[in-house]
Amino acid sequence: MQRCVVICVALLALASMAPAQAPRQNAQSDQLYRTGVISLGTKKFPEAEAAFRQLYELEPGNLRGLMGIVQVYTAQGKEEDAMRLLDTEIAKSPGRSDLLTAAGDTAMLAKNYDKAVALFEQALTAIPPESAAGVYMRLSDAWQKKGDDKSALEAVRHAKDLSPRDPAILSSLAVQLDAAGQKKEALEAYRTALEVDSRNAMALNNAAYLMAETGGDLYEALRYAQRADLLSPGSAPIADTIGWVKLKLGWTDDAIATFVRLVAGEPANVSYRAHLLAALEKSGAHTPGITELMTALKKDPAPENTDRITTILKSGLK
């Protein structure tokens, strides 16, 4: 049912893209659209498909009918049927960028990333450059899913050139730069994103972590992380960053307390385990409980090891 709800939300978004029509035709089209969405949401797939097919015949220049049929197929796990339908329509209108982009999105849903890349690249040849940033972001995602991080980074750079102040694009660029090991460039991208949207908790948190990792101002990093925590209270990744910055500042006891709480909540999380281990090693404490915990933290996060860590933490570190 959840998948159908998501699909229906996506279809409702398409409604806003409908071109102007005569009032009578518009009323008929909207009624067919509502029927299709409701039928899809209740898994009445034949009724939904019939309504969307009628809608597409009535307004072939609008994608909502066609994409409604596609969503009926994908809701039933028939991604190949959906792609065949889209390929047929693309053959009729090979220069229609909105159709190519929608087909690329469907290929992504089907995890056919090679086809998605080809469709998004084809869409870029048919779309005005000033409107291409979103397609470049889709292309970047497709390259990333294919495992080609270099091409993914190149695509998001193109998007940033077209929309240099878009915080979502800047954040995505920063994430990919960080993954590529270009940490200083990533930090700069996060700073630029925060100039546009100072309440972006993810950007604040990631920038704080990068500051700590690149020899930046640790007190500035702590301010960033604490602001992120105010904006997104209870976030474990943000708490982890705060603990890591505090460890770098030499506030070992505070850091240990933070990491103990995080590991107790997610004992299989490799990052939290590594940070707790680093804090315990820095503390120099060697009580039997701490020594046993450190030994357990060094092991792989198999269920028996995570269970042991949980038991130690519950019993205390004396």
Image: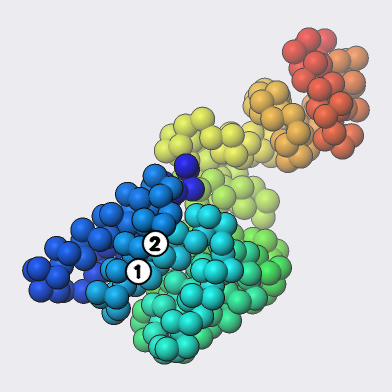
Along the line of sight, the residue nearer the viewer: 176 or 223: 176
Q: Are marks 1 and 2 in contact (CB under 8 Å)?
A: yes
Can you give x and y, in whole percent of width and height, for residue 303 in the image?
83, 29
Q: Is residue 122 above or below residue 51?
A: below
- The residue at the point 36 percent across, 56 percent down is 47
The reply to whether residue 217 is in sight is: no
Residue to which mark 1 is pinned: 53
Q: How packed is label 1: few (under 14 Cα within 10 Å), some, or many (20 or more)?
A: many
- The residue at the point 56 percent across, 38 percent down is 238
Along the line of sight, the residue nearer the viewer: 27 or 50: 50
Q: CA distance from mark 1 to mark 2?
A: 6 Å
**SS for tag 2?**
helix
Along the line of sight, the residue nearer the viewer: 6 or 72: 72
Tell whether 6 sits left or right of 17. right
Residue to which mark 2 is pinned: 49
- Quarter holding residue 318: top right
- The residue at the point 41 percent across, 57 percent down is 46
Tell whether 54 sits left or right of 43. left
Along the line of sight, the residue nearer the viewer: 168 or 27: 27
The reply to whether residue 221 is in sight is: yes
- Quarter holding residue 26: bottom left
Q: Which mark is residue 281?
A: none
